[in-house]
Image (cartoon, rainbow, N blue to C red):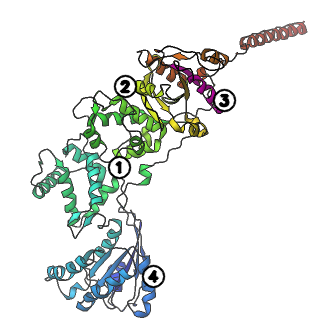
Amino acid sequence: MATAVRVCICGDEGTGKSSLIAALVKDTFVSNKIQAVLPQITIPPTPGHENVTTTVVDTSARPQDRTTLRKEIRKCNVIMLVYSDHYSYERVALFWMPYFRSLGVNVPVVLCANKSDLTGDGNAAQVLEEEMLPVMAEFREIDSCIRTSAKEGRNVIEVFWLCQKAVTHPIAPLYDHKENQLKPACVDALRRVFYLCDKDQDGYLNDKEMHEFQAKSFDKPLLPEELENIKAVVSKAVPTCNISKGLDLQGFLQLNKLYAEKGRHETIWIILRKHHYTDSLSLEDGFLQPKLDVPEYASTELSPAGYRFFMELFMTFDKDNDGGLNDQELAALFAPTPGLPPSWVEASFPSSTVRNEAGHITLQGWLAQWSMTTFLEPKTTLEYLAYLGFEGPNARDSTTAALKVTKPRKRRRRPGRVDRNVVLCYVLGSSASGKSTLLNAFLNRPFDALYHPTIKPRRAVNSVELGGGKQCYLILEELGELEPAILENQAKLDVCDLICYAYDSSDPDSFSHIVELRKRYPQLDELPAIYTALKADCDKTTQRSELQPDAYTAALNMSAPLHVSVTWHSISELFVALAEAATNPSTAFPKTEEPPDRTSLYMALGATTCAALAAFMIWRRSTSSM
């Protein structure tokens, strides 16, 4: 919301522009003659109200002052256009409004019928109907209109308040006067607010949800009589609304439409701004992308609060309780967002994670998918947490409370586990070695003997249970035709936790690809690795390589290749081994001869020396005393 409002007061000579300013400042009518153009005044924010500073600029309509007039109009946020008789009223449509348009300014105009003391109150409705409404219909930039009298002090404060409100709570983005409807962008924003407030997703705001909505939006409780009044207004405006169940979306939109029609659009703005909308009805950048510092070699994961939020979201939208989200349930879940994240669409979601027999994502797959997204694209997770209405344990928590940053992983060879629950493993190997089938098996997909070459990188993510009952999320990625580009990119290698070298044990030319790969990219030696012989259910063949796989790994002081087949139930042991190696990387490097540990020897020698020295000091004292 704007915190500074600049009001430019325009109108013909003698309409009382300066008198209105003087009456505002003095709080009384100044009967003495005042100067034609008053100096600029600044009105500080009112304590307890919105923090808005208002600057009021008086202008002259004389031709010789036209340059100054143009300059002030272009600098202002809102124009107060004053008329006081039939001639100056005619000039509103014939000169002033076309003149504003010719300057190319796009600011709201408040139309002020001054000197109402001369016409009396009896024809106020006639003035509104015959004068103001026609000109407002012709010029949509006119935000509001009001009758004032500087002499009687009538609506003096109110007209300046209208000018301020035209900037801080503009009606133009919300309501289309010509169509008598809320504008589409406003409807979309209010629809999202309704969605976030409908906690049980039954399509109605019940009394409890209405009270929570009131407290969040207006920071005050909703009184019982106010709630009943809202229900009565909505029932009258939307007879089809089943108000006994609560306020449905149509009723919620109709209620806000009534606010706009009755000039209470500041109420709509309060609601929208409490839900982080800007004046352009987009969500605030700082809300979608809060600051998140991720040190080098660190990673991002969901915090317990983040996992709890996504789990509750899944449970809420699994309406048929079948343990999976079908297309309709996913569409309802992502309704307040721009749709599925682009990276999910590119990866043909939900093919990258666990699905049930009907092809619908399960809770396990849902949490795994968000774990992978948070690891690879934390900004995407933060953005969707904002869209979906995440609220932290504390009211002031940002969406970053749903994430946690791991400790930087600087030295992979250091013994011990790394502080990570999500790890990434690149699966490298020759074409047709079984990498894609391995990823399918990781997601519990049935075996498909038909070969499908991988063109672009493909990922699969699932949870793996480690020793001691600890769970982690393992991301397997085959690189496709982008393998050379990714392996040459040090940043891509830095985020990788483990390399799985996979070869087809039944293809004699398969292992040589791994040998050549390690020669071409020596930087791979800096990553922990596991060697895997796939298709172990087929006849094993001798590899056309200088060293056979077992001898090759032995020469590197590495563990021998694990022989597995996706058709065996024991394939899950490979995934556990990969996750264990990724979380305990020192175990997946070449084994080196450890120097003998002489720590205890040094401690024993030190203790003996100290004892001898103490005995010597005692002997010297005893001999000297003799």
Q: Earlier in the sequence, mark 2 or mark 1?
A: 1
Please identify, in this view, whether the residue under mark 2 or under mark 4 is nearer the observer.
2
Please identify, in this view, whether the residue under mark 2 or under mark 1 is nearer the observer.
2
| Label 2 with label 4: CB-CB less than 8 Å | no
| Residue 401 x/y as whole percent | 43, 40
Q: Residue at x 28, y 50 (%)?
A: 193
Q: Earlier in the sequence, mark 2 or mark 4?
A: 4
**Residue assigned mark 3:** 519
| Residue 590: mark in rendering | none
For the residues labelled 1 and 3, the Cα–Cα distance comes to 45 Å
Task: Tell me: 11 left or right of 243.
Answer: right
| Residue 317 x/y as whole percent | 26, 37
Task: Tell me: 518 left or right of 31.
Answer: right
**Residue assigned mark 1:** 338
Mark yes or no: residue 521 visible: no
For the residues labelled 3 and 4, the Cα–Cα distance comes to 71 Å
Q: Between residues 618 and 383, which one lies in front from this camera angle? A: 383
Vertical arrangement, residue 221 with respect to residue 587, above or below: below
Q: Which residues are magenta?
A: 509-536
- What amino acid does circle 4 point to? Lys
Q: Residues within 10 Å of mark 2 (few under 14, many from 20)?
A: some
| Residue 445: mark in rendering | 2
- What amino acid does circle 2 point to? Arg
Q: Between residues 291 and 187, which one lies in front from this camera angle? A: 187
For the residues labelled 2 and 4, the Cα–Cα distance comes to 70 Å
Q: Secondary structure at mark 2?
A: loop
Q: Residue 587's quadrant in the figure?
A: top right
Vertical arrangement, residue 317 with respect to residue 568, above or below: below
Q: Earlier in the sequence, mark 3 or mark 4?
A: 4
Vertical arrangement, residue 234 with respect to residue 78, above or below: above
Task: Specify whether residue 510 is painted magenta.
Answer: yes
Q: Earlier in the sequence, mark 1 or mark 4?
A: 4
